[in-house]
Amino acid sequence: MGGHREVSVPIPVRLRVNNTPRDHTIEPRVLLVHYLRDACGLTGTHVGCETGICGACTVLVDGKAVKSCTMFAVQADGSDITTIEGLASNGHLHPLQQGFWDCHGLQCGYCTPGMIMASVHLLASGAVSSREEIAEGLRGNLCRCTGYSHIIDAVQQAAAEIGAAAAAGHRAPQSEVVHG
């Protein structure tokens, strides 16, 4: 009865997703996870809890791990976004993707994209040297299948590979990820 109803007016957003410019007009209430899946067709980013607890939706926003179910797409306007689809380069898996495969760091696979993206951020921070530090760094990403041991093995394998490449003077694989 005479109540006020707000209308959501679509607005333009411009993001760089996996090194590709993306321009869309979207409603301000669209979460980044839904923008990536629906507008960009990038379904590797999973929708889990939609409360920021599970981490299945983790992506990189300007190089930082972000739970994309907690951010509106309009908040990311002008940002560089990297999803799981943006990690492989020239037909080769990123060392973390390869590590998860080699070390059996997945079972059902639902948490894997978010876990890998959080691990990319963790390794890029350079503060990883022990299993405990890896476990602490991945604390915001839940896995109900593996018990984390194989996930930590995968991160350690990738860290060793990235470190060896850097020591040999090769470009570190994670530098392929776009950072603002």
Image (cartoon, grey):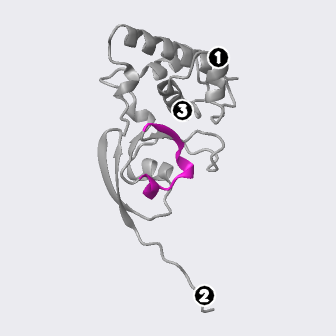
- SS label for mark 1: helix
The amino acid beneath tag 3 is Ala
Q: Which residues are magenta?
A: 63-76
For residue 146, say whether it is visible. Answer: yes
33 lies above or below 134: below
Q: Badge 3, how many Cα within 10 Å: few under 14, some, many 20+? A: many
The percent position of residue 22, horizontal first and vertical second, equals 31, 50
The residue lying toward the viewer, choosing from 17 and 106, is 17
179 lies above or below 156: below
Which numbered dot is residue 131? Answer: 1
The residue lying toward the viewer, choosing from 141 and 42, is 141
Sequence-wise first label, 3 or 1:
3
The amino acid beneath tag 1 is Arg
The residue that label 3 is drawn on is: 118
Which picture quadrant has residue 154?
Answer: top right
- Disc 3 and disc 1 in contact, CB within 8 angstroms: no
The percent position of residue 105, horizontal first and vertical second, equals 58, 21
The residue that label 2 is drawn on is: 3
Q: Badge 1, how many Cα within 10 Å: few under 14, some, many 20+? A: some
Asked whether, in this view, residue 28 is left or right of residue 134, the answer is: left
Q: From this viewpoint, which residue is outermost toward the bottom?
A: 2
Q: CA distance from mark 2 to mark 3?
A: 44 Å
Sequence-wise first label, 2 or 3:
2
The percent position of residue 175, horizontal first and vertical second, equals 36, 26
For residue 58, say whether it is visible. Answer: no
- SS label for mark 3: helix
Q: Residue shown at 45%/34% (left/top)?
A: 84
The amino acid beneath tag 2 is Gly
Q: Residue shown at 39%/9% (left/top)?
A: 167
The percent position of residue 112, horizontal first and vertical second, equals 55, 30
